[in-house]
Amino acid sequence: MSAVLTLDFTVNGKRRRVRVPPMKRLLDVLREDCGLTGTKEGCGEGECGACTVLMDGVPVNSCLVPAVQVAGVKIVTVEGLAKGPALSVLQRAFVELGGTQCGICTPGILVTAHALLRRAKGRVPGDGEVRVALAGNLCRCTGYQMIVNAVRAAARETRASARKRVARAAKPVARAKTRPVRAKAKPARPKAKIARTTAIPVKTQPKAVPGRKRARR
Amino acid sequence: MRAALSTLGVARPRDLAHALKLLHASLGAGRLVPLAGGTDLFVTLNSGFVPGRRFLDLGGLRELRGVREQGGRLVLGALSTFSEIREHALVRRRYPALAAAAAEIGAWQIQNRATLGGNIANASPAGDSLPVLLALEAVVQARSVRGVREVPFTALFRGYRDLALEPDELIAAVSLPPAPARAKQFFRKVGTRRAQSISKVVLAGLLRLGRDGRVDLARVALGSVAPVTLRTGGAERALLGARPSIAASDAARAALLEDIAPIDDIRSDREYRRRVSGNLLEQFLRVVDPRFARR
C-alpha cells in the first residue's frame, strides 16, 4: 500500500513514467501529469463520454479509470489520432461536414468513432451501427446527424483509398479479381463527401481567433 | 484532480490467494473496498462520497477472468466485462437473454470496463444483469480464506443492497447451469433511453411449452420493482400448466402485480412501473407464442 505510485504506461505510442496517487483518475493523469488536455471532463460519472480514450484499443471513460489499473497499458487520446500537423481522415470529415460545433464532446466522439472504424475494418458502418457505437457520447449541439454523416463519410473515403491501393498493387492479370464488385445500379442518394484536401481548407478555419474578440458589426 | 482521491490507498495483490488474505486481514481496521472495473465505484467517488480509505485492486487477478465450460455449465469469471459477455459465442448461443442484457448496460465505454462480478456486488435493485442471472438460476462462487462457497442466485439478495456474502468473501465467478432445452429466453429493459440509462423496469424470462401444448417451464424475474431483484412466483405458478391464451396472460399479469412493490423515485413512479411490468410480461408471452395475445 503506497500513497504514491510510479506508473509506467504508453500514451499515443510514447512510453511515459509518472508518479501519481494510485486512485487518481486516468483523465487527470493525462491532463495534469502528461500535459495532454485534448481529453475533456464532462459529467465525471461515465454518462457523457467526453473523456473517452482508448485503453488497449477499446474506448473507456477515463474519468472512471484509476491510475493503478493503467500500469503497462496502451492509451490513445485524441492527440494520438492525427499524424503530425495533418488531420486524420475522420477528423477532416468532422471539420468539413459540420460534425463539431462547440467542441467539448468532439475529442471523445473522435476517439470512439476511430475505434468503431478500426473494428469495421474497411466496411462502412450503417447509420444505426454508428449511433449505437456513439450512444455513450453525448453532444448537445449538433443533433448527431452531422456526426453520423462524418463518421460514415470517413469510412467511405478510407475504403475508397484502400481499394485504390489494392488495385495499384495488384498485377494486371489479377486486377480483374481484386477490382471491387459494384452492386447493380442503386437508386442514387446524395452522400456526404469530404473535399479532397489533406489539410483543413482555409474556408473552414474558424473565423474568430481564440482569445480575441470578434469585431462587432 | 478530486482532492479526496489523492489520499486513498490501494493494495495490489499478487494473486487471488493474496487478495483473500489481505481482505480478511483488513476486517479489523477499515475493510478494503474491492475495486474491479470501477464504473460504479468512481461514480460514487467523483460525487464526493468515499466508501472507504483503502481499496483492493482486483484488476490484475487472472483467476477471476475468462469464460469456460465446466461439465455442461458455463462459468464466467467475476472480471468478465459486459463486452466480453456480449460477444462470447457460447453466451450468445445458449444464453441470448444474458447477451442481450450485456449489450444494453451503459454504452460501449462502460461495457468495456464494467464487470459481471461488479454488477452483482453493487447489488442495485436496478442492476440489468441480475434478473437474467436469477431467471437462468445462476450460482455465485464466493471465495474467502476459508475456501469456496456456492450461493444460488435465488438466495443471494437478503434485502436492499444486502448480499448474503461475508465481508471477507469475494465473488470469484458466476456459474450458469445448462439453459433448459427448447425454452425461449427474453430480456427487455425500459429506461429513458436505450443506452446509458438506469432501468425503470427490467424483465427477464424463460418459457417453454410442453408436447401437450401447455407451459411446462416458466421463470419470470424483474428488477427496479422492489428492494431486491426478484422472481415472481405468482406469475410463474399462474403460467405453469396453462395453454397459451389471453386468459392465461391476464392471470399471470394479475399475479405478477401481487408480487412486486415498486416505489416513486427520481427515475419513475409506482404506477408507471406497475403498468410497464405488466406490459413487459405480456410482451414476453406474446413473443414466445402469439396465442397469448389472442381472444
Image (cartoon, helix red, strand yellow):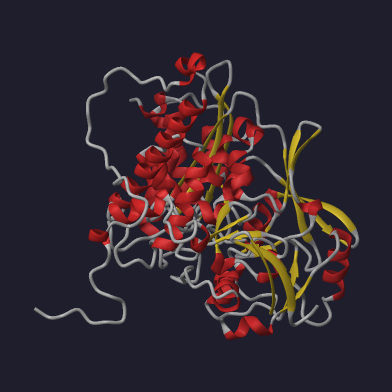
Please provide percent x and percent y for residue B23: 82, 70
Q: Establish if B115 lies above or below B66.
A: below
Please provide percent x and percent y for residue A15: 68, 65
Residue in the picture at 35% in, 40% down = A127
In front of the other: B234 or B54? B54
Residue in the picture at 83% in, 65% down = B19
In front of the other: B275 or B139? B139
The quadrant of the rendering that contains the N terminus of chain A is bottom right
Quarter holding residue A140: bottom left
In front of the other: A179 or B81? A179
Residue B199 visible in the picture: no
Please provide percent x and percent y for residue B58: 75, 62
In front of the other: A191 or A51? A191
Q: Residue furthest front?
A: A172
Residue A171 visible in the picture: yes
Q: Establish if A145 lies above or below B178.
A: below
Q: Establish if A42 lies above or below A92.
A: below
Please provide percent x and percent y for residue B157: 66, 58
Is B134 placed left or right of B196 in the picture? right
Is A190 placed left or right of A62 in the picture? left
Is B140 placed left or right of A121 in the picture? right
Q: Residue furthest right?
A: B146
How many numbered markers are drawn?
Answer: 0
Quarter holding residue A163: top left
The quadrant of the rendering that contains the C terminus of chain A is bottom left
